[in-house]
Image (cartoon, rainbow, N blue to C red):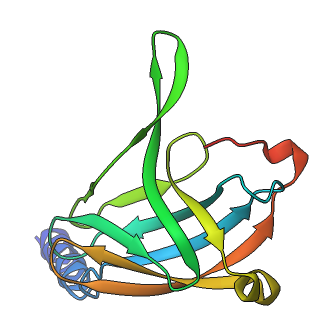
């Protein structure tokens, strides 16, 4: 009997602790730019989006330091890898969406020289739920082994 009471109390304590978790918050993290070594070729932005308390979608990304940005994803079609533009990306409640080499990414053209010298640029991520999140992304030189693995 006493063991049953301990198990019930332990179960209730775990339930209460899980209910005390901070609420999910929509956020963008681990943002970085791989700078193209060729001046007129696009560079690429990678990052992670962590979903908040509700489903939403990433609708746009802007930056005062960048001339043009486009969201893309790399897909396999008929045995070939190709890029397709995407206009929005679903971000599930408490889920994670990766923009990483070989998958979703943001092509960027025309990075301001001041941002290159500073080694970072600010990007503003706009979501379907009305939230806007400003994030500084570091700017890294692309190494030969990085290739253009979008």
Up the image or down, 69 lies above or below 147; here it is below
Position of 148 with respect to 23 (left or right) is right
Quadrant location of the C terminus in the rendered image: top right
- Residue 124 location, x and y as percent? 42, 82
Up the image or down, 148 lies above or below 106; here it is above
The residue drawn where x is 17% and y is 82% is 130
For residue 3, which quarter of the picture? bottom left
Q: In this orientation, which residue lies closer to the viewer: 95 or 107?
A: 107
| Extreme-top residue of the structure | 78
The residue drawn where x is 62% and y is 83% is 121
Quadrant location of the N terminus in the rendered image: bottom left
For residue 134, which quarter of the picture? bottom left
Up the image or down, 84 lies above or below 19; here it is above
Up the image or down, 65 lies above or below 61; here it is below
- Residue 94 location, x and y as percent? 27, 67
Q: How many marks?
A: 0
- Residue 16 location, x and y as percent? 18, 84
| Extreme-right residue of the structure | 144
The residue drawn where x is 25% and y is 73% is 127
- Residue 82 location, x and y as percent? 51, 28
The residue drawn where x is 49% and y is 80% is 63
For residue 116, which quarter of the picture? bottom right
Position of 122 with respect to 128 (left or right) is right
């Amino acid at each position: 009997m006493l063991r049953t009471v301990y198990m019930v109390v332990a179960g209730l304590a775990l339930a209460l602790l899980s209910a005390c978790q901070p609420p999910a918050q929509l956020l963008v993290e681990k943002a970085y730019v791989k700078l193209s070594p060729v001046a007129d070729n696009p560079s690429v932005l990678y990052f992670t989006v962590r979903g908040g308390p509700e489903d939403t979608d990433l609708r746009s990304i802007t930056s005062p330091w960048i001339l043009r940005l486009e969201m893309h994803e790399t897909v396999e079609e008929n045995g070939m890898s190709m890029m397709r533009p995407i206009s929005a990306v679903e971000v599930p409640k408490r889920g994670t969406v990766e923009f990483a080499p070989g998958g979703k990414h943001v092509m960027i053209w025309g990075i301001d020289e001041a941002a290159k010298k500073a080694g970072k640029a600010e990007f503003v991520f706009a979501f379907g739920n009305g939230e806007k999140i400003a994030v500084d992304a570091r700017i890294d030189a692309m190494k030969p082994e990085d290739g253009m693995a979008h």
